[in-house]
Image (tube, grey):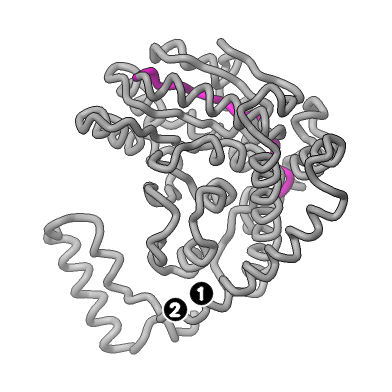
Amino acid sequence: MHRVIGERDLAETRLDDDDARAILEDMVRARRFDERAIALQRRGWMSGYPPFRGQEGSQVGAAHAMAEGDWIAPTYRANAMLFARGVPIVDVLAFRRGRTEFYSAGGGPRIPEAVPIATQIPHATGVGMAMNYDGADDAVVCYFGDGATSEGDFHEGLNFAGVFGAPVLFFCENNGWAISVPESRQTASESVAAKAEAYGMAGAQVDGNDPFAVYEATALSLDRVRSGEPVLLESLTYRQGAHTTADDPSRYAPDEPDLPAWRTADPIERAGAYLVEQGVVDDGFVESVAVDADEEIAAAVEEAESIDPAEPETVFDYVFDELPPELVAQREWLRSFVAEHGDVNELDY
């Protein structure tokens, strides 16, 4: 099992200075979005929101290692990864307000965000198998958390991928918690990466708070994936805040976690200090990017607010080609409810 832990010098990666600056910029953009999104949720602008503070290095580093035609299979917490892949901020905001997730049709090939835990893993394997059938040279990066490894979908998806050589990188972002359940209660294995052996694939761990190490580990993994060898990569990071805006981590998470310093270190501070030391960016780089990001986010919020209200019936449109009788009955009930009560978007709950 290949193990990558600790600082990763740029000279040891495929990154040049421009690449390194772009990674740091996307990390700062993602952090500013996360902070604004929490504020928006607190004033009722959107429903519950899953913060990802502390995980920007893991997600952005992996995203930058992907090729243009690669697919991503994300979860609800993969916003930093999506933004780094070019997904417009307004798409995520619209999704959080009940609109279509692909509002702008931008951001490259991707599977919809999976809110149920681990359901995207078999989907990612299926997309990878389809790539094999079509003779495509693309890959799939399937993102999930450590809690997903306790679901049956995890085992089924990895088993199929291993048997059929699906070009999938299974990217497990281990942030230490599955809501309030610590990683120690998820598995008796030495690590998540160690599980790869059972499925006949390579497994690796990487310091998830070093974006340059994550980039290199992801790039190396994708080299194997494109040759027909799926890989399980475990990115070790730490969730600095709550699981969602409905969670109170003070009830279960210790103030000082029993983890090494590199795993709980802030990835933006760490990468920023390193790039300043290397002369790649100056002391004002992060602050300048933050100002630009705030303007970009403000424009995206304004655009999201201008989107027409969602049509309730759209929830039935993308599940079946031909609706089964029980869903036809539910749709008819919804139509009668709207006819009686008016626009459901205006109801006071």
Total marks in image = 2
At a point 44% along the width and 86% down the height, the residue shown is: 346
Magenta region:
228-241
How many neighbours does mark 1 have within 10 angstroms: few (below 14), some (14-19), or many (20 or more)? Answer: many
* Observer-nearest of 71 and 328: 71
Judge from the rendering whether residue 96 lies leftward or rightward of residue 59; answer left or right.
left
Could you tell me residue 86's position as x and y percent? Answer: 50, 53
Dots 1, 2 in contact, CB < 8 A: yes
Could you tell me residue 48's position as x and y percent? Answer: 56, 61
Q: Is residue 323 above or below residue 334?
A: above
The image quadrant that residue 160 belongs to is top left
Amino acid at the residue labelled 1: Ala
Could you tell me residue 273's position as x and y percent? Answer: 84, 40
Q: Which residue is mark 2?
A: 307
Mark 1–mark 2 Cα distance, whole angstroms, equals 5 Å
The image quadrant that residue 153 belongs to is top left
* Observer-nearest of 269 and 193: 269
Amino acid at the residue labelled 2: Ile
At a point 32% along the width and 25% down the height, the residue shown is: 166
The image quadrant that residue 17 belongs to is top right
How many neighbours does mark 2 have within 10 angstroms: few (below 14), some (14-19), or many (20 or more)? Answer: few
Disc 1, SS:
helix
Q: Is residue 301 above or below residue 281?
A: below
Q: Which residue is mark 1?
A: 304
At a point 40% along the width and 80% down the height, the residue shown is: 309
Could you tell me residue 35's position as x and y percent? Answer: 70, 60
